[in-house]
Amino acid sequence: SSAALIFVPSPNRSSHIMKLACCMTLGASAAIPNVKLNNGVEMPLISLGTWQYNSSVAEDTVKLGMKVGFNHIDTANNYKNQDGVGRALAGLDRKSYFLTTKVPAPTTTKYYDETNQYLNEDLKLLNLDQVDLMLLHYPPQTNDCATMQEQWRAMEDFYKAGKAKAIGVSNYCISSLKCIAEKATVTPAVNQVEFHIGMGPDPTGLKSYCDSKGIFLQAYSPLGDGTTELITGPLVAGIGKAHGKSGAQVSLRWLVEHNIPLSTKSTSEKHLQEDLDIFEWSLTSDEKTQLDSATSPAGTPSFMCKAETVVV
């Protein structure tokens, strides 16, 4: 089957067009596009998340996801399931999948050493020598800048040692990104945050800020958090009906059209297949405007920066 080339805006202001290579063909013609990160690494636009799954469920879900066509898996140290994810990926061609994992904020004052310990623990649990993307899962509860800078120093050393192809952050506010930038020698490639319809296309100015720095925002909870509004609600369901798609597919497609990589999750083969069917059709400009202006369900990019609103 042939894979189409897809073009999307680049996060780099100096270059607004970027070719996307397709890394896995699906069915007869569909393919998962890649986005090119700021260090040249190509990351599949959609990932299969494993939050709230134990090791056994994570193993089964990753195997199912790979079978239906996913090629990007998302896990984390805090999920306590990396051993299951590792078992699911064991024996597969390492070039056939992209793996993202994360390390938590430190609980001691040895910020660098503890972070380094988590980083190497992730590799051991996954039974890998290298991950594709390593993220700091969230800022420390204190939002202490020195802690973030030491964590990022450990991440940079891990990256420079060849143990991650790219490094980034998650749940980072603009102030957190500015903090690590003061001493960073490597700019985060990704900031994974809550992002969905109802938050607008530039929540708290975070997307504009990340775009200006060449950092890709990546969406978790793309269907909202604890709501069915973005699955069966009248706005997305009505638009979906016009395209022969589900409300959930409309919600995911909205992110794709804003050049936002996303992480979705399901243990259902049918739902996983539907999640991948978001690349070969488009929203109309009127539909996109309606979805852009929706104010429900409400959300904030990070539980760490609920009160932070920055106009860029």
Image (spheres, rainbow, N blue to C red):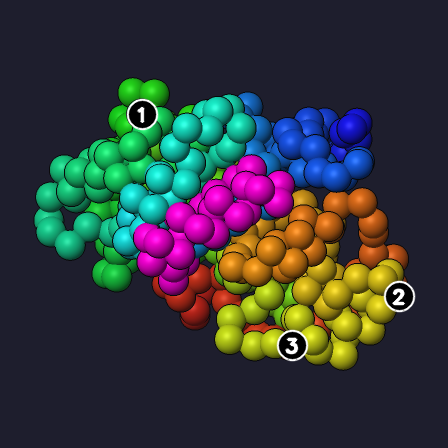
Q: Residue at x 29, y 32 (%)?
A: 127
Rendered image quadrant of residue 22: top right
Residue kind at label 3, given as amino acid type:
Glu
Whether residue 16 is visible: no
Q: Position of residue 149 (x, y in %)?
A: 27, 41
Residue kind at label 1, given as amino acid type:
Asp
Q: Secondary structure at mark 1?
A: loop
For disc 2, the marked residue is 242
Instruction: Say which quadrant the N terminus sits in.
Output: top right
Q: Position of residue 233 (x, y in %)?
A: 71, 78
Residue kind at label 2, given as amino acid type:
Ala
Give the answer, above or below, for where 254 lies relative to 300: above
For disc 3, the marked residue is 229
For disc 1, the marked residue is 129
* Residue closest to the eye, 274 or 198: 274
Q: Position of residue 205 (x, y in %)?
A: 57, 57
Whether residue 78 is visible: yes
Q: Disc 2 and disc 1: Cα gap in Å?
A: 47 Å
Q: Secondary structure at mark 2?
A: helix
Question: Which portion, as a residue range, is magenta?
Answer: 51-75
